[in-house]
Amino acid sequence: MKAQLSSLLMGLSVCSSAWADAFVAPFTGYSLGSDGVNLARYDNGDAKQQDSFHGGVMLGLAQRGYGDVYLFYSRQQSDLLLHRDATAPLDQMTIEYWHLAGTLYFSDSALRPYVSSSIGLSRFSPDSARDTTNKFSLGLATGLNYQFTTNLALFAEFRGFATFFGDDSSIACRSDERCTWYISRDTFWQGQANLGLQFHF
């Protein structure tokens, strides 16, 4: 029994030394990729998601000397515009990303370049529909993290998302199967340029 207790305490000690602290990282940025966000409405022809600002937050654990594991959330709301008439919005749509992610740092100095990957769901919510659509998605990011103190860092990154629709290209269908929007391709591409602060506890 004493041996088992000693092993447990040793394991907890190793874990506490490896996982240094928790962090929260609010950020803002600009969502890009109108060419990859082409939508086709059944009665109005081709449209596109307007590039716009978004906001979000990361919640995670920092691992000493290696990287981070975190939950990623972002939210963008912008107009859906006709290709032939970009002055008259047809609708508004909210796009959210809910991802589990990990970061690998390439330096342990104050300025740390990094790469990150993520997996999760993309959530599409047109204002004209009562329902939302959730699709599987993957993300990749690269950026720089500058450590001001042990508790505060500034980061800038570019993050790309691929959302997979496959054969089911409809968005926000109601029970009568009358769909409001359709994705015009199998994969929905979008990029983000993000700037934020990372607070460690």
Image: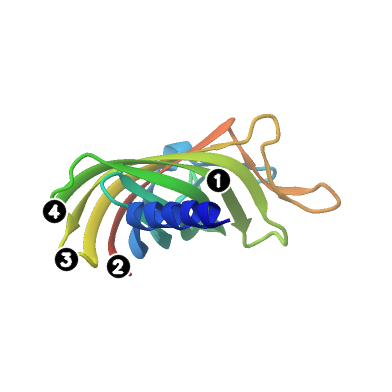
Of residues 114 and 173, the one nearer the viewer is 114
| Sequence-first tag of 1 and 4 | 4
Could you tell me residue 129's position as x and y percent?
Answer: 70, 59
Could you tell me residue 59's position as x and y percent?
Answer: 43, 61
**Residue type at tag 4:** Ala
Residue shown at the point (67%, 56%) measured from the top left: 132
What number is the disc on residue 199?
2
Query: Which residue lies under the disc numbered 4?
Result: 110
Q: Is residue 34 left or right of residue 179?
A: left
Q: Are marks 4 and 3 in contact (CB under 8 Å)?
A: no
Residue shown at the point (22%, 62%) measured from the top left: 153
**Residue type at tag 3:** Thr
Could you tell me residue 116's position as x and y percent?
Answer: 36, 42
**Residue type at tag 2:** Phe
| Sequence-first tag of 3 and 1 | 1
Query: Which residue lies under the disc numbered 3?
Result: 149
Label 3 and label 1: CA atoms lie apart by 31 Å
| Sequence-first tag of 2 and 4 | 4
Residue shown at the point (62%, 57%) measured from the top left: 126
Q: Residues within 10 Å of mark 3 (few under 14, many from 20)?
A: few
| Sequence-first tag of 3 and 2 | 3
